[in-house]
């Protein structure tokens, strides 16, 4: 990504006036985060920590690629009524600091474990991941099985989706097209071109006051860098999960699947539904963003999972 950074810097210099206008727009639209900044190493991770510290379980929410903690604007307060809940912005997203060099799922997991330690968020954890976030949460469960009580995957990607060895020509072309779009957004972000085209990173139709947050963080240059970097290194992230230790065969997993009828997507959801001996799949009539289209089904699933854990008197090994 060094070449892209050079191009971005050069364009920012040549289009200095546009850069100034974009900087002014960012300053004008600036809003503070919904949660707190947790310092780890030489940077900060934005987290929203809610619910009672006396809860037996801590629910961790990880959004999909291009999305952040705001994705859980409705779900988190509801789940907080019966459990401690933590959502967070991966590096570069939302109000979190960006990082130099590559950033993969393994980096996300290592950041998250440090954040949880800083917050004194004690296990057991119920991990909830949407789309690309599901990839991260599965890797977390693999690396820290002794801390994880259950896993909920919301139309999660399977690692095969990002492994080029698994692609046909159509999938290869789609990947290349998406990579070009993310790259273009990144190198033109300082000039404010995505803002002119009304193409922020993240959601476009959230209810107020949440959309105003996207209108700020969604046009930040570091956010475009984050999504481009995450997609650029997605194959490495997928390989990390592919090579990770298998999950505990008794780990409770719930797979919430969308109505996507694409053959490979259905195949991947079926694979996910057989990750452990204790995995169930719930097929829905919703699109990819189930947690936004029907948040109640996600809330109910989290509540049922926790109730089932209590019923079985879950204990960390």
Image: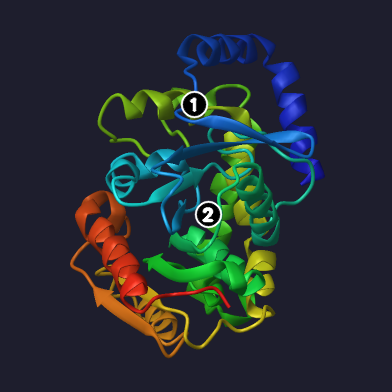
Q: How far apart, in angstroms, are the residues tagged by discs 1 and 2? A: 29 Å
For marks 1 and 2, the one nearer the N-term is 1
Residue occupied by mark 2: 178
- Of residue 29 and residue 127, the one placed in the foreground of this image is 127
112 over 280 or under it: above or below: above
27 over 83 or under it: above or below: above
Residue that appears at 76% across and 47% down? 1
Residue occupied by mark 1: 33
- Dividing the image into 4 quarters, which one contains the C terminus? bottom right
Q: Where in the figure is residue 44, as x and y percent of width and height?
A: 67, 34
Is label 2 in a helix, a strand or a loop?
Answer: helix
Residue that appears at 26% across and 56% down? 299
Residue 183 in view: no
277 over 215 or under it: above or below: below
Which of label 1 and label 2 is nearer to you?
Answer: 1
Q: Where in the figure is residue 177, as x and y percent of width and height?
A: 53, 56
């Amino acid at each position: 990504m060094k070449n892209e950074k050079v191009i971005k810097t050069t364009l920012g210099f040549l289009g200095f006036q546009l850069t100034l206008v974009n900087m002014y727009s960012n300053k004008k639209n600036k809003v503070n985060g919904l949660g707190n900044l947790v310092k780890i190493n030489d940077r900060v991770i934005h987290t929203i920590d809610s619910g009672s510290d006396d809860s037996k379980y801590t629910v961790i929410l990880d959004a999909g690629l291009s999305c952040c903690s705001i994705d859980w604007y409705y779900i988190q307060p509801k789940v907080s009524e019966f459990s401690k809940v933590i959502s967070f912005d991966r590096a570069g997203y939302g109000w979190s600091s960006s990082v130099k060099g590559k950033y993969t799922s393994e980096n996300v997991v290592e950041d998250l474990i440090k954040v949880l330690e800083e917050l004194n968020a004690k296990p057991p954890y119920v991990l909830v991941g949407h789309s690309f976030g599901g990839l991260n949460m599965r890797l977390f469960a693999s690396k820290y099985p002794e801390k994880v009580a259950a896993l909920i995957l919301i139309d999660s990607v399977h690692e095969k989706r990002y492994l080029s060895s698994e692609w046909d020509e159509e999938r290869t072309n789609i990947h290349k097209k998406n990579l070009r779009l993310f790259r273009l957004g990144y190198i033109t972000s300082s000039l404010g071109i995505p803002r002119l085209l009304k193409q922020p990173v993240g959601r476009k139709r959230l209810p107020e006051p949440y959309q105003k947050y996207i209108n700020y963080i969604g046009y930040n240059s570091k956010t475009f860098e984050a999504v481009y970097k995450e997609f650029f290194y997605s194959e490495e992230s997928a390989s990390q999960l592919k090579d990770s230790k298998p999950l505990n065969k008794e780990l409770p997993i719930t797979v919430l699947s969308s109505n996507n009828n694409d053959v490979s997507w259905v195949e991947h959801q079926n694979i996910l539904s057989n990750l452990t001996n204790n995995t169930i799949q719930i097929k829905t009539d919703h699109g990819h963003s189930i947690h936004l289209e029907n948040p109640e089904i996600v809330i109910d699933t989290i509540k049922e999972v926790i109730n089932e854990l209590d019923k079985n008197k879950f204990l960390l090994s």
